[in-house]
Image (tube, rainbow, N blue to C red):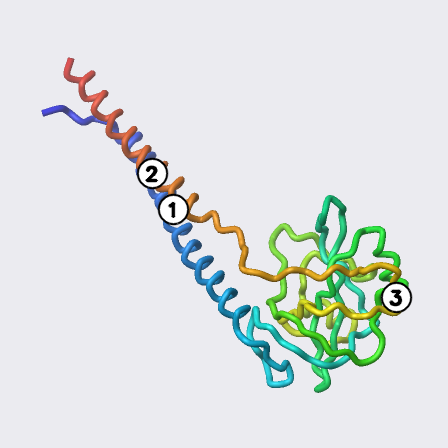
Amino acid sequence: MRAFRPGWAVTLLSFLALVVLVSLGTWQVQRLFWKEALIAGIEEGLAAPPVDLADGMPGDYRQVFTNGRILAEPRLFFGSLVRNGEGGTLLLGVFEDEAGRQWLVERGWIPEWAVADAKDGRFDVEGDVAFGAITRPVRRSGPFTPDPDLETGRIFAEVPEEVNERFGTTVGDTVLVLRTRLATRSAPTELPLLSAVDADLPNNHLGYVVTWYGLAAALAGVYVAFGLARGREAGT
């Protein structure tokens, strides 16, 4: 019978590393199930018939139709987004429905050169409007999200509390993404370009599962081979 003598230090380090690798793999399994459920929920919501926003909160990723007005202020510019090779941003505003409820509304993409036009009101929508939209949750900030500059309207997360405090609005955690092109006050172009909402989300978690569990298996194999090799050396 072959002697197996990896040594206590190697055993301890290998065990700790194995725990970390298996934990990471298990976490990615959980993330995989979560992402698959999220994608399925988005697909189900988008496939459902449109509902009237006046009937209540429809949930995320639902087609809705509504009436009301888009306020002239605030005008918010979310993040940086390249479209057709050109840098730009998402134009957000506040929509007030007929019941007086206020919502963040994603109007669409504009190039960077059009930000000044937006601030001058060239993309404002006058009067009452009726439109279709898709609901989605706000994009909250993370540990590496830059701070917003609400003086200029530049934001990198959609934090209703900050918007409400700065502008005196009452928006909540649901964003309306426009699906209907609205006539603007004096815009000379087709801007803003409507945003797409679909279930085509990145889902690389299965690859991460294979990677972490594969590394764990490789570590176990190396540990066993090392222990057997040291055992042979000790027996000679």
Instruction: Say which amino acid is labelled 1.
Output: Gly
**On the image, which quarter does residue 161 sit in?**
bottom right
Residue plotted at (68% across, 60% down): 195
- Residue under pointer 1: 25
Say above or below: 131 vs 121: below
Relative depth, front residue between 86 and 219 = 86
Residue plotted at (61% across, 70% down): 135
Q: Which mark is residue 121?
A: 3
Residue plotted at (62% across, 76% down): 64
Q: CA distance from mark 2 to mark 1?
A: 9 Å
Relative depth, front residue between 16 and 123 = 123
Q: CA distance from mark 1 to mark 3?
A: 51 Å
Q: Secondary structure at mark 3?
A: loop
Instruction: Say which amino acid is labelled 3.
Output: Gly
Q: Residues within 10 Å of mark 3 (few under 14, many from 20)?
A: some
**On the image, which quarter does residue 142 sit in?**
bottom right
